[in-house]
Image (tube, rainbow, N blue to C red):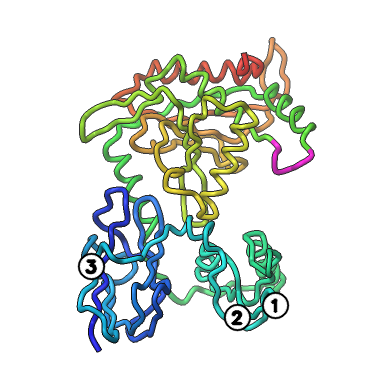
């Protein structure tokens, strides 16, 4: 018997350290070569780590949330006829979870029932992670994919059915008092979100500008265009229209389509608009990117926005699809409220917040009438965007959104 020291390999993109996301093994476990032993978190992705050897786990580098430097021991195995130490460069350990979901969706584990007729549960790593977090046995989830593979829609439907069963249980007259306080370790994407929000608020002198606009005509146009779409999944929301108006406005206000390189103290004013779309996911807030959004037509922009947002939600977005935005739009849809103060997505200098559209009485040509009204609540980096320019850009967007034909002229 001898010890095999498996060091954390280079995870790419200049990464010098990584956070332990989760362990799939514990000390004393016997593992086979190429088995997934855990997940490491970088700023951009969760990366599954494979065992380079077969052997027994002797020690682990730490607990979820701990930071490990590239080249430092990650796992020590007890093996037969193995070298005492594994060179980092020879390891075959890593695959981004997003790529694993697309390339190897059929990693199998034994279930209690016969899923797909072969006694194996077949699904993606993203679904396995969600099931683990929710405490759900995938063997109980019916799969509708090829060979009984559990699709995201299958898992969501099963989760919904469990919630309905829970609601069906009679609620006691007196709610029980919680008996303990739960500790939730801030790790992974949630830790990174906390760090970035703190950094943005600490370094950027935000100022917000809120403008009200009448989107009655825009909504009429949206509904007219949707009447021609049989597929509900392709129906347009207000967001692509707002994004189109933003890109038209940026032609006159390019200082808002800018990122700040603080290390070199340089502003990068971009010709192309790489539009960040703030997206709520089960893991927290992500900002997938629509590349060269200024070159897309309305339908193309809507389709690409849906695609990258869905990829962010189901963890199939590539690293490139989660980086490189030059300006961000954020919307909570029906939960958008009346006004908000969005936090700038560093290193950008502006973010456009979309609030809820509501019908209310307004005065038009001296008469009270009901119109569909909506606010844009936007934040800017006051170091590089003057208040006048910010207000003028939002006013230009307001003019186009209130007269939507001008968006396409």
Q: Earlier in the sequence, mark 2 or mark 3?
A: 3
Residue 207 seen in this snapshot: no
- Relative to 240, say whether 190 is above or below: below
Question: Dividing the picture into quarters, in which one does residue 359 lie?
Answer: top right
Where does the N terminus fall, quadrant-wise?
Answer: bottom left
Q: Position of residue 30 (x, y in %)?
A: 38, 85
Q: Earlier in the sequence, mark 3 or mark 1?
A: 3
- Residue count near mark 3 (Cα–Cα under 10 Å), binned few <14, some 14–19, many ≥20: some
Label 1, secondary structure: give it: helix
Q: How many marks?
A: 3
Q: Magenta residues?
A: 230-235
> Label 2 to label 3, Cα distance in Å?
36 Å
In this image, 62 relative to 185: left or right? left
Where does the C terminus fall, quadrant-wise?
Answer: top right
Comparing labels 3 and 1, the label whose residue is closer to the camera: 3
Label 2, secondary structure: give it: loop
- Relative to 246, say whether 364 is above or below: above
Q: Which mark is residue 111?
A: 2
**Residue placed at 57% from the left, 48% from the top?**
310
Residue 34 colored magenta?
A: no
Q: Earlier in the sequence, mark 2 or mark 1?
A: 2
Residue under numbered circle 3: 87
**Residue placed at 68% from the left, 34% from the top?**
236
Residue under numbered circle 1: 117
Question: Dividing the picture into quarters, in which one does residue 131 lie?
Answer: bottom right
**Residue placed at 62% from the left, 60% from the top?**
152
Q: Position of residue 210 (x, y in %)?
A: 48, 26
Extreme residue toward the top, this view = 365
- Asked if the residues shown at circle 2 and circle 1 are in contact, with their CB atoms under 8 angstroms apart, the answer is no
In this image, 121 relative to 86: left or right? right
Question: Dividing the picture into quarters, in which one does residue 145 lie?
Answer: bottom right
């Amino acid at each position: 018997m001898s010890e095999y020291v498996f060091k954390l390999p280079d995870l790419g993109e200049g990464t010098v350290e990584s956070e332990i996301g989760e362990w799939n093994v514990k000390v004393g476990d016997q593992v086979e070569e190429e088995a997934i032993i855990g997940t490491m978190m970088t700023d951009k992705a969760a990366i599954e780590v494979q065992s380079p050897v077969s052997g027994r786990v002797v020690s682990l580098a730490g607990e979820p949330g701990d930071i490990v430097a590239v080249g430092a021991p990650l796992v020590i195995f007890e093996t037969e006829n193995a070298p005492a130490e594994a060179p980092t460069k020879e390891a075959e350990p890593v695959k981004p979870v997003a790529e694993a979901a697309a390339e190897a969706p059929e990693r199998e584990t034994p279930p209690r029932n016969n899923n797909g007729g072969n006694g194996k549960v077949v699904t993606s790593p993203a679904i396995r992670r969600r099931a683990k977090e929710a405490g759900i046995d995938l063997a109980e989830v019916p799969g509708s994919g090829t060979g009984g593979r559990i699709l995201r829609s299958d898992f969501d439907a099963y989760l919904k059915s469990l919630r309905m069963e829970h609601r069906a249980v009679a609620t006691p007259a007196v709610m029980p008092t919680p008996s303990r306080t739960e500790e939730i370790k801030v790790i992974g994407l949630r830790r990174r979100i906390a760090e970035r929000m703190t950094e943005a608020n600490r370094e950027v002198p935000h100022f917000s500008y809120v403008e009200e606009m009448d989107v009655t005509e825009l909504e009429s146009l949206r509904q007219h265009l949707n009447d021609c779409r049989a597929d509900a999944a392709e129906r347009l929301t207000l967001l692509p229209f707002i994004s189109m108006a933003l890109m038209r406005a940026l032609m006159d206000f390019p200082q808002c389509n800018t990122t700040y390189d603080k290390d070199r103290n340089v502003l990068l004013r971009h010709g192309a608009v790489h539009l960040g779309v703030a997206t709520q996911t089960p893991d927290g807030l992500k900002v997938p990117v629509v590349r060269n959004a200024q070159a897309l037509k309305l339908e193309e922009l809507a389709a690409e926005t849906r695609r990258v947002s869905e990829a962010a939600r189901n963890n199939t977005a590539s690293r490139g699809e989660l980086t490189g935005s030059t300006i961000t739009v954020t919307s909570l849809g029906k939960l958008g409220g009346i006004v908000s103060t969005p936090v700038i997505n560093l290193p950008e200098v502006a973010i456009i917040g979309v609030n809820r559209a509501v019908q209310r009485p307004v005065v038009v040509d001296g008469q009270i009438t009901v119109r569909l009204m909506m606010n844009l609540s936007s934040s800017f980096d006051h170091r590089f965007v003057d208040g006048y320019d910010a207000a003028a850009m939002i006013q230009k967007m307001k003019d186009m959104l209130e007269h939507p034909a001008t968006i396409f002229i």
